[in-house]
Every structure is written in C-alpha cells, then in structure tokens.
C-alpha cells in the first residue's frame, strides 16, 4: 500500500458560508469543489497537493460543545482535534495574527519538542491545531517511544508486524468494479 496523506477529512457544519469565510478567506485554503442539492452540500478545501478538508452542510446540525484540545472525556467520542501542518513558525505567527484580528481565540505558540503548535477553534467549535516541525527534529525518520509503560502492542516497535491479521485474498481483476457515486458531476463532460 502507498499512502499519500489524508485525501479529505469530512466534517459537518450548519453554516457553509461562515465555514468558507473562515477556512478560505481567513486561512487561505482554496475552495476546490462543491456538491449540492436542497438540504445538502459537500464542499472541499485544499490543504496541500494531496490533502483536503471537506464539510457537509446539514440544516439541523449544531456546533459541537467547545472542548479543549487533548482533554479527556467520558462516553461516546471519536474526534479530539485536527492538526494542520504548516511550513515553519512564521506561518504559525501569521495564522495567529489573522485569527486574533478576526476575533477568534488563538493560543500562544507551544513548543512540544518535536513540533511547535498553535491552537484555536473554527466557527463550528471544531478544535484546530496548526503545527510545524522543530528544526532538526524528525520523529518520522527516528521514531521514539517515550511512554514509560507502553502497551504490549506498542512495545513491538514502529514497523508493521506481519502475521497479526489474516492474509487477504486479492480480488481478481475480472471482479474489480468501480460504481458511480456522488461527485461525478464535478468532472466536466460527466452526465448524471
């Protein structure tokens, strides 16, 4: 398998206009695609050459309760925050200045040892972190386990452990089909 990044992270909003104003006009992400019909919109914003943020607009969704980044909760829960990578600390300062000028809360810049981070929230109360690498530190090149009591599975190391799942049976080429779905209308010349 060859992963290329996060194709898109799909989030939800009741106010697509406020969401576009924040992500496109304040933070500078291009709006690259939009799907819609009554009661439904699905828009995509470009993060990088391989990564996008997407928002569904659903009329009855409400902003989530504000929850500070990384603070534990109880009960059903699946998402804490999204961290968006930027080039360097100058980008973090630029984002912080933009957020504050627009009236959004922005944290101080935080040194985590391997990344510098800035924290905020979008208009939907989605917790956002903006992160850049600390110069000279690359945990991807040199994985580190600083947990003093790692789980048994984590003790196995950073690389894929073969034999932990059943071997797949490849789908024969003659059975590989791709079915039409939402979004084909974005491609010029495609009919519904």
Image (cartoon, helix red, strand yellow):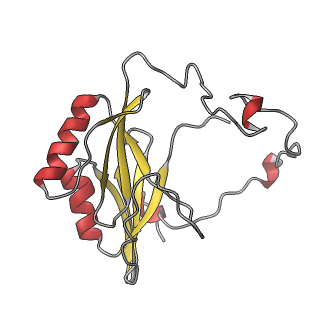
In the figure, 135 relative to 148: above or below? above
**Quadrant of residue 3 in the image?**
top right
Residue pushed farthest left?
Answer: 101
Q: Left of 96 or right of it: where is 155?
A: right
Which residue is situated farthest in the top direction here? 136
Where is residue 46 drawn, in percent x and y? 35, 48
In this rendered view, identify the residue nearer to me: 140 or 43: 140
Q: Is residue 117 visible?
A: yes
Q: Relative to residue 92, is residue 192 drawn left or right?
A: right
The N terminus: image quadrant = top right
Residue found 33% across the figure and 67% down from its top: 124
Residue 115 position in % (x across, y down): 40, 31
Q: Residue at x 19, y 51 (%)?
A: 99
The x and y percentages for residue 114 are 44, 27
Q: Position of residue 152 (x, y in %)?
A: 78, 38
Residue 36 sits in quarter: bottom left
**Which residue is depicted at the point 37% across and 82% down?**
59
Front residue of 43/90: it is: 90
Residue 130 found in image quarter:
top left
């Amino acid at each position: 398998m060859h992963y290329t990044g996060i194709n898109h992270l799909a989030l939800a909003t009741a106010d697509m206009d406020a969401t576009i104003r924040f992500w496109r006009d304040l933070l500078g992400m291009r709006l690259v695609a939009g799907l819609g019909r009554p009661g439904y919109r699905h828009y995509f914003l470009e993060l990088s050459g391989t990564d996008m943020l997407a928002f569904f607009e659903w009329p009855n969704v409400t902003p989530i309760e504000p929850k500070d980044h990384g603070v534990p909760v109880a009960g059903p829960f699946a998402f804490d925050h999204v961290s968006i990578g930027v080039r360097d600390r100058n980008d973090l300062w630029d984002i912080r200045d933009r957020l504050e000028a627009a009236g959004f809360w922005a944290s101080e810049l935080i040194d985590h040892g391997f990344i510098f981070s800035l924290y905020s929230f979008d208009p939907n109360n989605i917790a956002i972190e903006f992160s850049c690498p600390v110069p000279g530190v690359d945990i991807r090149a040199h994985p580190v386990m600083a947990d003093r009591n790692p789980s048994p599975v984590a003790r196995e190391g950073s690389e894929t452990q073969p034999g932990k799942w059943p071997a797949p049976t490849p789908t024969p080429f003659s059975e590989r089909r791709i079915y039409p779905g939402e979004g084909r209308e974005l491609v010029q010349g495609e009919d519904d």
